[in-house]
Amino acid sequence: MASTASSQTIKPIVAGNWKMNGARASLATLAAIGEGVGSQLASKVDVMICPPAPLVFAAATACEKLPMTIGAQDCHAEESGAHTGDTSAEMLADCGAVAVIVGHSERRADHGERDADVKAKAEAAYRAGLVAIVCVGETRAQREAGEEIAVVSDQLAESLPDAATAANTIVAYEPVWAIGTGLTPTANDVAAMHKVMRDRLTARFGNEGASMRLLYGGSVKPGNAAELMGIDHVNGALVGGASLKAEDFLGIISAYA
Ligand SMILES: O=C(CO)COP(=O)(O)O
C-alpha cells in the first residue's frame, strides 16, 4: 500500500502564469523577483515564472543566476511538423524551460482543448523532459449544480497520463469562476477538493500520487496567500495577475517565509 506522505514533506512551488502579458522589458520583473526570493526562501519554496513563448529563452537565460526557474504556458503534442503557429515541448526545453502548463481553462475554453488533448500534451512534456503542470477546475455553473467533485475527478482521470509521477507532474486546481475575478472558494471548499484530488491520485499512482504537488490557483493575492497555502494538501499556488508585479508575487511567496 502507498504510504501517506503529508503535505509537510512536499516542497511547495509558487508558479506565476503571465498569460499573454509581458515584453522584453518585463525581464526586469524576473530580476526583482529573484533578488527578493533570496537563497533562504528558495530553500523552502520553489519559484517559477511561465512567460509567453517569445520570452522563454531570454527569461530562462536571465534565471540561470536567479533562485527560480522558467516554464511555458502550452505546447503542441507532437515534436515537430506542419503545425503553423504551434510550439513543441522540445522547442521549449531547448529554450531553457523546465515545465509547461497544459490544460489551463483558458485553453480549454478558447481553443476547445479536451482532456485527451491535455493528456497528449502532458505526454509531450514528459518526452521532452519537462514537468507538466496539469490544470483542472470546474465552472461556476458546475459548482452551482454541485458537480465540482465529479468534474475535477473526471478531468484528473482523463488528463493525467499513466506515466505521471511526483517528479514530472504538478496538478493545479483552478476553479474557472475564481480566475481573475477576485473570488476564491472558502478554505473548507479548497480543503475538500484537494483531499479528493490527493485520494484519487494516491489510489491511481500510489506513492507518486501521495507526493505529487497540488497547487491552488484563482485570485491568489498577498492578502489571502497565507490562508490558502496553509490548507492541507495545498502545496503551492499557480498565480495569474499577481505574478506580473514583483512586489505582489513576492508577497505571495512570503507565505512560506
Ligand atoms: O489562471 C490563473 C493562473 O493560471 C489564475 O489567474 P488569477 O491569479 O489572475 O486569478
Image (cartoon, rainbow, N blue to C red):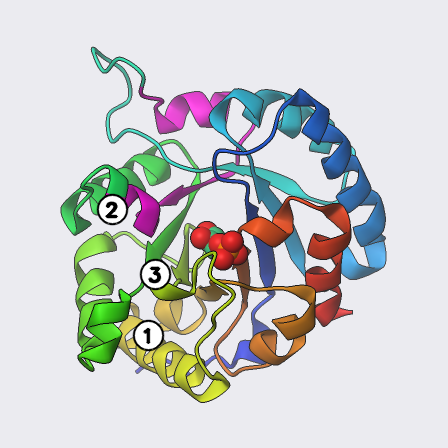
Q: Earlier in the sequence, mark 1 or mark 2?
A: 2
Res 43 visible: no
Distance in Å between CA atoms under marks 1 and 2: 22 Å
Q: Residue furthest bottom?
A: 188
Residue bearing mark 2 = 109
Q: Is 168 above or below relative to 210?
A: above
* Image: magenta residue range: 86-109
Distance in Å between CA atoms under marks 2 and 3: 10 Å
Question: Of the residues shown, which amino acid type is indicated by label 2?
Answer: Ala
Q: Is 221 above or below relative to 83?
A: below
Residue 212 in percent (x, y) is at 43, 65
Residue bearing mark 3 = 176
Question: Of the residues shown, which amino acid type is indicated by label 1?
Answer: Met
Q: Earlier in the sequence, mark 2 or mark 3?
A: 2
Instruction: Identify the image quadrant of the C terminus.
Output: bottom right
Q: Give me the residue at 49% from left, 84% from top.
A: 187
Q: Is 121 above or below relative to 55?
A: below
Q: Is residue 108 magenta?
A: yes
Res 37 visible: yes
30 horizontally vs 146: left or right = right
Mark 3 burial class by Cα count in 10 Å: few <14, some 14-19, many 20+ = many
- Label annotation for residue 140: none
How many numbered discs sit on the rendered protein? 3
Q: Is the C-beta separation of discs 2 and 3 under 8 Å?
A: yes
Q: Give me the residue at 28% from left, 29% from top.
A: 76
Residue bearing mark 1 = 197
Callout 1 secondary element? helix
Q: Is residue 115 magenta?
A: no
Q: Quadrant of residue 231?
A: bottom right
